[in-house]
Structures are given as structure tokens and as C-alpha cells.
Image (cartoon, rainbow, N blue to C red):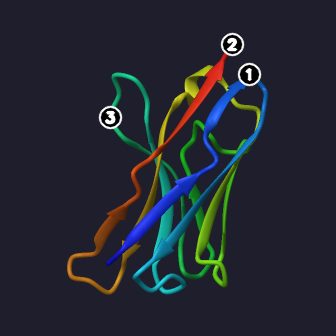
């Protein structure tokens, strides 16, 4: 059974930092892609950052230069370091694992962790 569990969310002030973590079990880790998505109040879920098996990364324009995605294969954990947080970063953040050898590629999701940035 595939399971993704996020941690590290919370309430912070503008300009603060947080690090989100997501542990994946029940599925191959290093051969698949991982990512972070978020859904703000009244908004659709949007991509924040992704990391591929070759360690290449991709970021949304809104977080480029402030957020960093990384992963520890031995710990089966993907991280999202968020610096200089702004009120518009307030959202539920979801961990994603994309199974690349499925046809079509299959997405797995964590339950989400709330990040709230106060002004």
C-alpha cells in the first residue's frame, strides 16, 4: 500500500522559513518523481516544485529563488525548504509521487499539511 505522509507545516510570520518533509512507503522511491503542490483558499491546486530521478528540478515562477526541493533517497523523504514566506504562500501543501513506469504515469498524494503565513 502506497503511503505519503507530510509534516512540517505551521503558522509563521511574513519573511519566516519552514521546511516540509514527506516520507513515502510502499512504492519505489529513487526511480520515481516527487513533488509539492499547494491549494490556497478558493484556488485550484497548483504545482510548487518537482524533482526527477536524475535530480533535475522544476519550480513555479512564484516560488523560484525562495523555495528549494530536495530528497534523501536513503530516508525515502522529499523536502521543501521555504524561505521568505509571504501571505500568498498560505495554502495546504500536498506531497506527490509520480510513478513513472505506469502507463499512464500514476500520481499518489499525501493528505496535506497546512502552511499559514501571517502579515
Location of residue 99 (image quadrant):
bottom left
Q: Secondary structure at mark 2?
A: loop
Q: Earlier in the sequence, mark 1 or mark 2?
A: 1
Q: Is 24 placed above or below 26 here?
A: above
Residue 9 is situated, as x and y percent measured from the top left of the image, at 61, 41
| Residue on which the image places disc 2 | 119
| Residue on which the image places disc 1 | 14
Residue 46 is situated, as x and y percent measured from the top left of the image, at 41, 42
Q: Earlier in the sequence, mark 2 or mark 3?
A: 3
The residue lying toward the viewer, choosing from 11 and 56, is: 11
Report, in whole angstroms, how far the alpha carbon at label 1 lies from the one at label 2.
5 Å
Q: Residues within 10 Å of mark 2 (few under 14, many from 20)?
A: few
Q: Is 88 placed above or below 67 here?
A: above
Q: Secondary structure at mark 1?
A: loop
Furthest-top residue in view?
119
The residue lying toward the viewer, choosing from 59 and 26, is: 26
Location of residue 55 (image quadrant):
bottom right
Q: Residue at x 62, y 40 (%)?
A: 63
- Mark 2 or 3: in front is 2
Quarter of the figure that contains the C terminus: top right
Q: Are marks 2 and 3 in contact (CB under 8 Å)?
A: no
Residue 11 is situated, as x and y percent measured from the top left of the image, at 65, 28
Q: Is 42 placed above or below 57 here?
A: above
Total number of numbered discs in the rendering: 3
Q: Residues within 10 Å of mark 3 (few under 14, many from 20)?
A: few
| Residue on which the image places disc 3 | 44
Q: Earlier in the sequence, mark 3 or mark 1?
A: 1
Q: Residue at x 60, y 64 (%)?
A: 57
Report, in whole angstroms, how far the alpha carbon at label 2 lies from the one at label 3.
22 Å
Q: Are marks 1 and 2 in contact (CB under 8 Å)?
A: yes
Amino acid at each position: 500500500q502506497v503511503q505519503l505522509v507530510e509534516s512540517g507545516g505551521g503558522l509563521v510570520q511574513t519573511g519566516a522559513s519552514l521546511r516540509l518533509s514527506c516520507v513515502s512507503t510502499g512504492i519505489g522511491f529513487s526511480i520515481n518523481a516527487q513533488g509539492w503542490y499547494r491549494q490556497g483558499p478558493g484556488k485550484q491546486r497548483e504545482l510548487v516544485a518537482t524533482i526527477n530521478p536524475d535530480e533535475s528540478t522544476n519550480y513555479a515562477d512564484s516560488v523560484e529563488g525562495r523555495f528549494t526541493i530536495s530528497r534523501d533517497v536513503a530516508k525515502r523523504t522529499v523536502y521543501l525548504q521555504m524561505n521568505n514566506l509571504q501571505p500568498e504562500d498560505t495554502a495546504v501543501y500536498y506531497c506527490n509521487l509520480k510513478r513513472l513506469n505506469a502507463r499512464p504515469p500514476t500520481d499518489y498524494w499525501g493528505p496535506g499539511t497546512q502552511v499559514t503565513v501571517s502579515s
